[in-house]
Amino acid sequence: MPGYRAGMTDWHFLVDRNDYRHTRTVDAEPAALADGQARVRVDAFGFTANNITYAAAGDMIGYWTFFPAPDLGDAVQWGRVPVWGFADVVESRSDGVNEGERLFGYFPMSTELVIEPTGVTEAALSDGAPHRAALPPVYNRYVRCGADPGYDADLEAEQMLYRPLFFTSFLIDDFLDDNGFFGASTVVLTSASSKTSFGTAHLLHQREELTVVGLTSAGNVGFVERLGCYDRVVTYDDVASLPDGPAALVDMSGNASVVRSVHERYGDDLKVSAVVGITHWEDRLGSAEPLPGPAQTMFFAPSQIEKRHQDWGPGVVEERLAEAWGPFIEKVSGWVTIEHGSGPDAVADVFAEMLEGETSPDVAHVLHP
């Protein structure tokens, strides 16, 4: 798209990796393209509590590695938080990648990204940049919207906000089923109002042998109950009322006191305690005293994807996800109000709001750089 840059300002939204409240926006100078590279302009991305988990687990899992921050010459260790969204190819020196095509995938909170397309097929391509080579392939893959049978331009906002999180929900449900639910008859989900939690609850709720319980704050009870995908909704201060019997805990909150209260409620009746998210990022440090019951295990979605690729063969995970996605997106339509914002100030405002946990569960954000 010759001349598309006219009048446009490029920027990066940066986060202090040691103090998430310390952020800044800096201008970016577009780099010249080398042979084999393509430049994409980030058009829109969804921002949810899951993106706060990307920051909180950035060093543990490597989320900061995907999109290194520019060196500003100061003492701050800056990072760029990954987001899921859409971008358009605006310049290409890569065979088979065309200017004007639209991609869905993993991007930085920036106006553009230079990628090195590899594994290019009609359906997708991957970023083969050397610094991403050792990272999970699912995060390096970009779907080519023009060849995606599931792409609907009218549902882009829902795809950005729900599709990546529902993929995680699908894999949590599959992980539990793959392990016979560890003998549990109750599954307890924390941060029940979060999209990953209620996506998981939607899938688990279809299994008649399970009781699905959502743990949430008192202020979110009404919203969570209206979702209709939990058998019971319990507040964080009423953990003692959780159902008796063998249980599984799927923790999206990272809140150490909540996790401890569930472990103490069940003791040895807690059959598995899986950590998925860290939405309560400031409450993740708890007592050094060991937890009753099982040790916590980190659920890492790419590991379950790889296992199922080996179990089922290529393409089956994606087929089963697509089968589950249609009914889910039809059901959740209207559950939340989607608010749109544009420019770096809107990005900064939404980031701060989400960081402080001030976003209402019935509101979701789509941002346009």
Image (cartoon, rainbow, N blue to C red):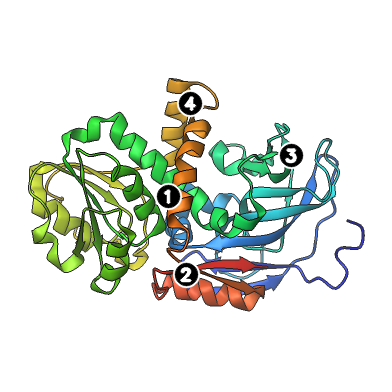
Name which residue type carries label 3: Pro
Q: Which mark is residue 309?
A: 4
How many numbered marks does the figure carry?
4
* Residue 148 falls in image quadrant: top right
* Residue 126 falls in image quadrant: top right
Q: Which element type, helix, strand or loop, lies under badge 1?
A: helix
* Residue 35 falls in image quadrant: top right
Q: Earlier in the sequence, mark 3 or mark 1?
A: 1
The residue carrying mark 1 is 60
Instruction: Say whether residue 158 is left or right of residue 88.
Output: left
Distance, label 3 to label 1, CA atoms, is 27 Å
Q: Which mark is residue 20?
A: 2
Quarter placement of the N terminus: bottom right
Q: Earlier in the sequence, mark 3 or mark 4?
A: 3
The residue carrying mark 3 is 117
Name which residue type carries label 4: His
In percent of width and height, residue 80 lies at 58, 61
Point 34% across, 62% down: residue: 193
Distance, label 1 to label 2, CA atoms, is 16 Å
Q: Which element type, helix, strand or loop, lies under badge 4?
A: helix
Q: Is residue 268 above or below residue 289?
A: above
